[in-house]
């Protein structure tokens, strides 16, 4: 439902603006969401790597309608995932909506610690 040819071309100027923003001490990190980040890997990977290099101590979260299993099956998606710290996975489901949940909208979504999950081979939930 979104036109992938719409919008403006991302340039180094926009990357520098993001890097400047993330360098602020009041900013905890970077969050990738809106649309579907894993459908824009080629565009996001250089940005995420630049943020990681400039601010290695800051967390990078990614929200996706894809589940962790689906992401891990695709080498390109996994490449972007490996650059992030936290994955909120799964589609938002209105029937499972819970306003009391932190950092997610519906009960089916998980908040996954990516580094611990990839190193252990088991899904490690970062928080409930």
Image: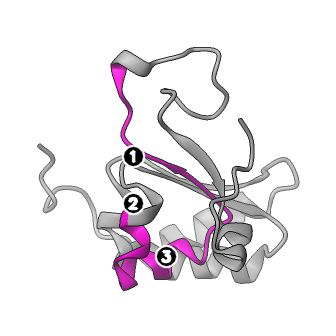
Q: How many numbered marks are there? A: 3
In the structure shown, which secondary structural element does the residue marked by tag 3 occupy? helix
Residue 6 part of the magenta segment: no
In the structure shown, which secondary structural element does the residue marked by tag 1 occupy? loop
Reading the image, the residue beneath label 2 is 37
Reading the image, the residue beneath label 3 is 80
Left/right of residue 102 with respect to residue 13 in the rendered view: right
Q: Position of residue 41 (x, y in %)?
A: 37, 74
First of labels 3, 2 by sequence position: 2
Q: Badge 3, how many Cα within 10 Å: few under 14, some, many 20+?
A: many
Which numbered marker is on residue 11? none
Location of the N terminus by quadrant is top left
Whole-number angstrom distance, CA of label 1 to CA of label 2:
7 Å
Q: Are marks 1 and 2 in contact (CB under 8 Å)?
A: yes
Q: Closest to the observer: 102 or 28? A: 102
Q: Closest to the observer: 94 or 44? A: 94
First of labels 1, 3 by sequence position: 1
In the structure shown, which secondary structural element does the residue marked by tag 2 occupy? helix
Which residue: 16% across, 60% down?
Answer: 4
Q: Position of residue 6 (x, y in %)?
A: 16, 56
Reading the image, the residue beneath label 1 is 34
Residue 91 part of the magenta segment: yes
Image position of 74 with respect to 93: above or below: below
Q: Badge 2, how many Cα within 10 Å: few under 14, some, many 20+?
A: many
Whole-number angstrom distance, CA of label 1 to CA of label 3:
16 Å
- Kindly indicate the quadrant of the structure image that contains residue 104: top right
Q: Position of residue 55 (x, y in %)?
A: 78, 73
């Amino acid at each position: 439902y979104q036109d992938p040819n719409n919008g403006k071309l991302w340039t180094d100027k926009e990357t520098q603006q993001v890097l400047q923003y993330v360098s602020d001490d009041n900013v905890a990190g970077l969050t990738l969401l809106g649309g579907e980040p894993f459908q824009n890997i080629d565009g996001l990977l250089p940005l995420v790597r630049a943020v990681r290099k400039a601010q290695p101590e800051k967390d990078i979260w990614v929200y996706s309608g894809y589940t962790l299993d689906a992401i891990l099956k695709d080498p390109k998606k996994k490449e972007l995932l490996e650059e992030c710290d936290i994955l909120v996975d799964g589609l938002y489901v209105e029937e499972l909506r819970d306003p009391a949940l932190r950092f997610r909208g519906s009960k089916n979504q998980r908040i996954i610690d990516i580094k611990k999950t990839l190193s252990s081979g088991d899904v490690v939930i970062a928080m409930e």
